Image (cartoon, grey):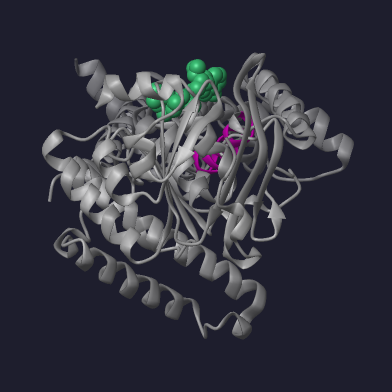
């Protein structure tokens, strides 16, 4: 199943283009040729059975796993090419994990500021005044201000100076999401962001994601929350055995699934 | 016990009136310099080696570095400290024509030696940190090195503080071998007092007490440091 709407899309709208993506772990074929075109503002939900390769697919996009074959075109470069500076591209491609992965040795506000300050400092050392900053202190100040604004947005500004171990799961995941936002990425990848949460905390995280989606962020979300996918996504993908078996707009995808395995899968989870 | 009182007086005489305390001071200073610098440089070296050892190995440079580190750790863990001191002082440094004092050689060898041991502790410490921490750092665009230094190593050090403390205590005690290359440590100082006063009992008892007091103080310092590092576990 390839992308049905790719034909009437202009080049500038395309943020990410995946072609023939394959991933083997030793002799185990986990991804068997995935093609996907992602446009600015797309909210793509990825569903599929356990072990089908959803996480591996997502992790190949920002090269947390190095693809075995294929191309990942992003910002005019092929991320699958080992010679690109992947760290620069990852600054434009946020990631939110199932287990939050907040930095345990940093306070909440430091978690959010860390990467912006680090990349700001790096640019300042290289470009000096041309980086747009006058001093390292200014970089920190700006990052801190933005971090506090993000915390205010999720209603956690009074938690700025505590360590992550003191937060609830829902709070941790919301901080992790704004930590990704702080880098002002072009795309954010979510790998089952609500799967590790107690049921009563799922709502607050989905609400924030809905909010981020409304602002026009491009998002690729692996999820088991079918209701959320149906409501928020503009495209849903079904992955099984490392292939996209079906892809479409949510109404059609859930209302009139064609692939037999998708039908079977939906009958089990819905 | 009258005998002991006599010995004690004799010791005090040599310790204070004949200036033995100056040698003890000097010895204590050297012992501390060698142990403290050995620990600090050891942490530095050990951390670097541990980072090399946990680096992804599909590129050529990490593999070469890793081979070198294995050799280094193997050598320093596989030979006694005295042998290393003698080798450096009488063989290696003369061959390459470097002239440094025996205290400096001791600091060098203690650093290299503790670096080898600490690298193994640090590796275990790094492996005990949730891999998700490294992933999160890499995912926001930090390099392997930056994530290691800012995120993983601080957590690893926190995890291995008790073992680092033990290493420090071991280093303090092991300084008693530096006299082999002519550095004056506590042992040399008390031995000097003993041989001049023809009385070894009290000097050696006092020497043992000084070692014990140092170890107790260090143990307390470790506890305080652990408490400080535990702040990220505390609720606020
Ligand atoms: N690092 C790895 N080494 C070897 N095999 C792996 C590795 N990571 C994943 N796999 C295998 O690849 C397959 C796909 O795993 P993946 O985590 O992508 O599945 P998933 O669709 O995300 O499943 P789930 O819904 O359970 O999260 C699984 O069989 C898994 O065992
Ligand atoms: Mg998964």
Tell me where residue A138 sits by quadrant: bottom left
Q: Is residue B165 left or right of residue B45?
A: left
Left or right of residue A135: residue A29: right
> Which is the main secondary structure of the residues drawn in magenta?
helix
Q: Which image quadrant for residue A33?
A: top right
Where does the magenta region start and end?
A: B37-53
Q: Which residue is drawn at 58% across and 75% down?
A: A124
Could you tell me residue A103's position as x and y percent? 36, 46
Residue B159 percent across, percent down from the top left: 36, 32
Q: Which residue is drawn at 69% across and 22% down?
A: B70
Q: Residue at position x 24%, y 27% from top?
A: A270
Left or right: B234, with A19 as reference point: left
- Whether residue A88 is visible to the viewer of this picture, yes or no, is no
Residue A213 visible at all: yes
The residue nearer to you, when weighing B106 against B116, is: B116
- Relative depth, front residue between B216 and B181: B216
Which quadrant: the N terminus of chain A?
Answer: top right
Residue B177 included in the magenta stretch of the image: no
Against A36, residue B210 (above or below) is above
Tally the marks. 0
The answer to which of A153 and A253 lies nearer the viewer is A253
């Amino acid at each position: 199943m390839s992308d049905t709407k790719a034909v009437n899309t202009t080049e500038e709208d395309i943020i990410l283009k995946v072609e023939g993506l394959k991933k083997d772990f030793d002799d185990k074929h986990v991804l068997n040729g995935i093609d996907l075109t992602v446009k600015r503002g797309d909210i793509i939900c990825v569903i599929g059975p356990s072990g089908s390769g959803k996480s591996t697919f997502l992790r190949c996009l920002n090269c947390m796993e190095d693809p075995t074959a294929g191309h990942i075109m992003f910002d005019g470069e092929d991320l699958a090419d080992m010679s690109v500076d992947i760290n620069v591209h990852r600054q434009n491609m946020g990631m939110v994990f199932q287990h939050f992965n907040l930095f345990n040795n940093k306070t909440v506000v430091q978690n959010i500021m860390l990467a912006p300050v680090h990349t700001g400092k790096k640019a300042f050392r290289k470009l000096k005044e041309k980086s747009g900053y006058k001093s390292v202190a200014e970089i920190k100040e700006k990052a801190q201000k933005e971090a506090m604004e993000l915390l205010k947005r999720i209603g956690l500004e009074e938690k700025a100076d505590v360590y992550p171990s003191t937060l609830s799961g829902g709070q941790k995941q919301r901080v992790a999401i704004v930590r990704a936002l702080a880098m002002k990425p072009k795309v954010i990848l979510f790998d089952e962001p609500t799967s590790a949460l107690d049921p009563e905390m799922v709502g607050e995280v989905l609400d924030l994601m809905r909010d981020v989606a409304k602002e026009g962020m491009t998002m690729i979300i692996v999820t088991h929350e079918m209701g959320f996918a149906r409501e928020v996504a503009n495209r849903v993908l079904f992955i099984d055995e490392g292939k996209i078996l079906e892809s479409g707009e949510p109404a059609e995808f859930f209302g009139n699934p064609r692939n037999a395995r998708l039908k079977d899968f939906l009958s089990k989870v819905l | 016990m009258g005998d002991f009182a006599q010995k004690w007086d004799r010791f005090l005489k040599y310790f204070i009136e004949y200036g033995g305390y100056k040698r003890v001071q000097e010895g204590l200073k050297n012992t501390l310099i060698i142990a403290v610098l050995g620990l600090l440089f050891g942490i530095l070296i050990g951390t670097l080696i541990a980072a090399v050892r946990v680096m992804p190995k599909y590129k050529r440079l990490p593999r070469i570095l890793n081979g070198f580190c294995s050799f280094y750790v193997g050598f320093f863990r596989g030979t006694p400290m005295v042998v290393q001191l003698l080798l450096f002082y009488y063989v290696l440094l003369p061959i390459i024509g470097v002239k440094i004092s025996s205290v400096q050689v001791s600091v060098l060898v203690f650093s290299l030696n503790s670096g080898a041991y600490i690298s193994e502790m640090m590796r275990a410490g790094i492996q005990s940190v949730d891999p998700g921490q490294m992933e999160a750092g890499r995912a926001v665009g930090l390099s392997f090195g930056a994530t290691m230094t800012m995120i993983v190593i601080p957590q690893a050090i926190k995890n291995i503080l008790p073992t680092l403390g033990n290493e420090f205590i071991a280093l303090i005690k092991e300084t008693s071998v530096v006299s082999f290359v002519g550095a004056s440590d506590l042992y040399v100082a008390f031995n000097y007092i003993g041989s001049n006063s023809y009385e070894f009992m009290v000097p050696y008892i006092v020497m043992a007490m000084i070692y014990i007091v140092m170890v107790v103080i260090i143990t307390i310092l470790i506890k305080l440091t652990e408490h400080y590092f535990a702040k990220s576990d505390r609720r606020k």
